Image (cartoon, rainbow, N blue to C red):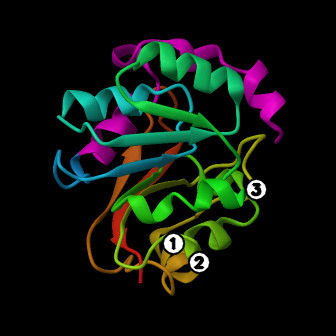
C-alpha cells in the first residue's frame, strides 16, 4: 500500500500506548531489546507507540523512520525526545544511516513490503533484528507466516532465526490472529 493509505488510516494508531491494540506485541518485542544503551533504528516506526515504550525502558538512542508523513508527525508529537524521519526504506539516504545502529526493529513491517529480503540484506552484519510477522492475512499484507518454519525458510540465510525463542503473541483484540515475535542476529 502507498504512504497515502497509511496517512489516511490512522484510527487505532492514535490511541495512547496503554490502549493500543498492539500493546501485547510491543511488550514482548521490548523484552528482546538488549539494553538501554543500544542504538535503535525502528524501521516502519508508525506513530511512535513502540518508541514510547522503549523510552520507558530507558532507550535514548533511537531513530524511527516511516514513509507516512502523517504517522511521523504523530510520532514526533507523541515522543518528542527521540528522532523521527519521513523516508522510504528503499532509499539510499535512509539505508546510509543503518551502520550507525546496532539494533533494528522491524515489527509489523516485513509482511507489508515486497522486498523484505532486500531490506534485511541491507542491515549491517552482526546487528540485532527484533521482528514480528503475522499468521493471518489483511488488506495491506503481501505475505503471512503459517508457522515458525516459514520464518526460518524465508529469513534463515540472513538472520540467525534458530538461535533463540520465537514468541507467539495472541492478539487480545482478535484472538484468532497470532503474531510471531523474535530477535536474531543479522548473519
State how far apart marks 2 and 3 are (Cα): 14 Å
Q: Residue at x 41, y 79 (%)?
A: 125
Please say if 62 is above or below 180: above
Q: Is residue 49 magenta?
A: no
State how far apart marks 3 and 1 are (Cα): 15 Å
Instruction: List the residue tagged with mark 3.
Output: 142
Q: For numbered disc 2, what is the local secondary structure?
A: helix
Q: Earlier in the sequence, mark 2 or mark 3?
A: 3
Q: Residue at x 52, y 38 (%)?
A: 45
- In the picture provided, is 42 more to the left or to the right than 34? right
Q: Is residue 27 magenta?
A: yes
Q: For numbered disc 1, what is the local secondary structure?
A: helix
Residue 121 position within the rendered picture, expressed as x and y whole percent measured from the top left: 58, 76
- Quadrant location of residue 185? bottom left
Residue 154 is labelled as: 2
Q: Nearer the viewer, residue 175 or 98?
A: 98
Instruction: List the residue tagged with mark 1.
Output: 151
The stretch of residues the image draws in magenta is: 1-30
Residue 46 position within the rendered picture, expressed as x and y whole percent measured from the top left: 56, 32
Q: Are marks 2 and 1 in contact (CB under 8 Å)?
A: yes
Amino acid at each position: 500500500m502507498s504512504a497515502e493509505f497509511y496517512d489516511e488510516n490512522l484510527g487505532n494508531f492514535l490511541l495512547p500506548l496503554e490502549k493500543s491494540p498492539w500493546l501485547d506485541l510491543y511488550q514482548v518485542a521490548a523484552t528482546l531489546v538488549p539494553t538501554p544503551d543500544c542504538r535503535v533504528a525502528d524501521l516502519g516506526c508508525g506513530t511512535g507507540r513502540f518508541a514510547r515504550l522503549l523510552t520507558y525502558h530507558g532507550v535514548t538512542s533511537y531513530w524511527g523512520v516511516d514513509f507516512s508523513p502523517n504517522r511521523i508527525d504523530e510520532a514526533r508529537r507523541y515522543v518528542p525526545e527521540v528522532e523521527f524521519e519521513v523516508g522510504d526504506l528503499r532509499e539510499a539516504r535512509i539505508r546510509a544511516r543503518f551502520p550507525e545502529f546496532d539494533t533494528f526493529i522491524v515489527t509489523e513491517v516485513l509482511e507489508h513490503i515486497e522486498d523484505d529480503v532486500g531490506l534485511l540484506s541491507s542491515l549491517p552484519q552482526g546487528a540485532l533484528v527484533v521482528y514480528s510477522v503475522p499468521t493471518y492475512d489483511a488488506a495491506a499484507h503481501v505475505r503471512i507466516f503459517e508457522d515458525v518454519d516459514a520464518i526460518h525458510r524465508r529469513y534463515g540465510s540472513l538472520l540467525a532465526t534458530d538461535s533463540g525463542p520465537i514468541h507467539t503473541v495472541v492478539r487480545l483484540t482478535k484472538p484468532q490472529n497470532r503474531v510471531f515475535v523474535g530477535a536474531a542476529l543479522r548473519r
